[in-house]
Image (cartoon, grey):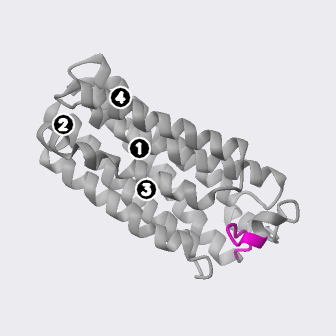
Amino acid sequence: MRFLRVLKSFRLREPEYVPFVTRSGLVRWDYDPHEIIADGIVHLLGIALSVIAVLVLLALAAIYATTTAQLVSVAVYAAGLVAMLAISASYNLWPVSPAKWVLRSVDHSAIFVLIAATYTPFLAKLHDGFIGAALLIGVWSVAILGIGLKILMPGRFEKLSIGLYLAMGWSGVVAYDSLSSSLPSTTMWFICAGGALYTFGVIFHAWQRLRFQNAIWHSFVLAAAACHYMAVLALVLVSG
């Protein structure tokens, strides 16, 4: 109950210290208390479930992984997932202030990290090591580029960033044959389902005028992240 009282006490207003962003309509921080509570519940649920799920995944990977590289790749994914959800909760639930603007850049950077981290265990299992290494270098290079964009030029190139997220997320299509021949069919289905959920959820991310838009978008993020978690879990159990 104390958590709910704290959320209700937030006084939200448009941040005057970033006027060029608020004029562009790309940032919305004026959520009413009910919207913040809904988003807070989604985030706290996501963090709690992800911590439990990651501990289970790491324990199983320690048992079933056949190489140290496979175990490390799963650990990279696990760290990226928990970090993204924790940073997202910090940013979205933080009161409007200059610190929130900084957290926004960190939050958006964490999305790049999660996409690259999610690809890591899948690409590490490709039978064609050259293609796997090339794609792994590629997605992490784009992630570093995106992080630099968010940290050095916050609030700019927002549409470009969304394009980079989607391009990174669907970049595995170029190696579909290698992925489908190297990964369990269950893993492939969960990867595609997660990508579809992320992509469809972008509609609500952009639908700024819709009430509870942020909570709905983050619900899609959790559902997509759950699909990708199941994909990694299937990879560990079936092909470990």
The residue carrying mark 2 is 237
Which mark is drawn over residue 73?
4
Which mark is drawn over residue 166?
3
Residues shaded magenta: 23-31
Mark 3 residue type: Leu
User: What is the distance, in whole Å, between disc 2 and disc 4 at their CAs?
Assistant: 15 Å
User: What is the distance, in whole Å, between disc 3 and disc 4 at their CAs?
Assistant: 22 Å
Which mark is drawn over residue 60?
none
Mark 2 residue type: Leu
**Foreground: disc 1 or disc 3:** 3
Mark 4 residue type: Ser
Residue in the image at 34% along x and 52% along y = 170
The residue carrying mark 1 is 52
Residue in the image at 58% along x and 82% along y = 210
Callout 1: 10 Å neighbours few (<14), some, many (20+)?
Answer: few
Q: Are marks 1 and 3 in contact (CB under 8 Å)?
A: no
Marks 2 and 4, the one that precedes in the sequence? 4
State the residue in front, 230 or 181. Answer: 181
Above/below status of 194 relative to 207? above
Callout 4: 10 Å neighbours few (<14), some, many (20+)?
Answer: many
Marks 1 and 3, the one that precedes in the sequence? 1
**Foreground: disc 1 or disc 2:** 2
User: Outermost residue toward the bottom?
Assistant: 210
User: What is the distance, in whole Å, between disc 2 and disc 3 at their CAs?
Assistant: 28 Å
Q: Dot 1: what SS?
A: helix
The quarter of the image holding the C terminus is top left
Q: Dot 4: what SS?
A: helix
User: What is the distance, in whole Å, between disc 1 and disc 3 at their CAs?
Assistant: 28 Å
Mark 1 residue type: Ile
State the residue in front, 239 or 199. Answer: 199
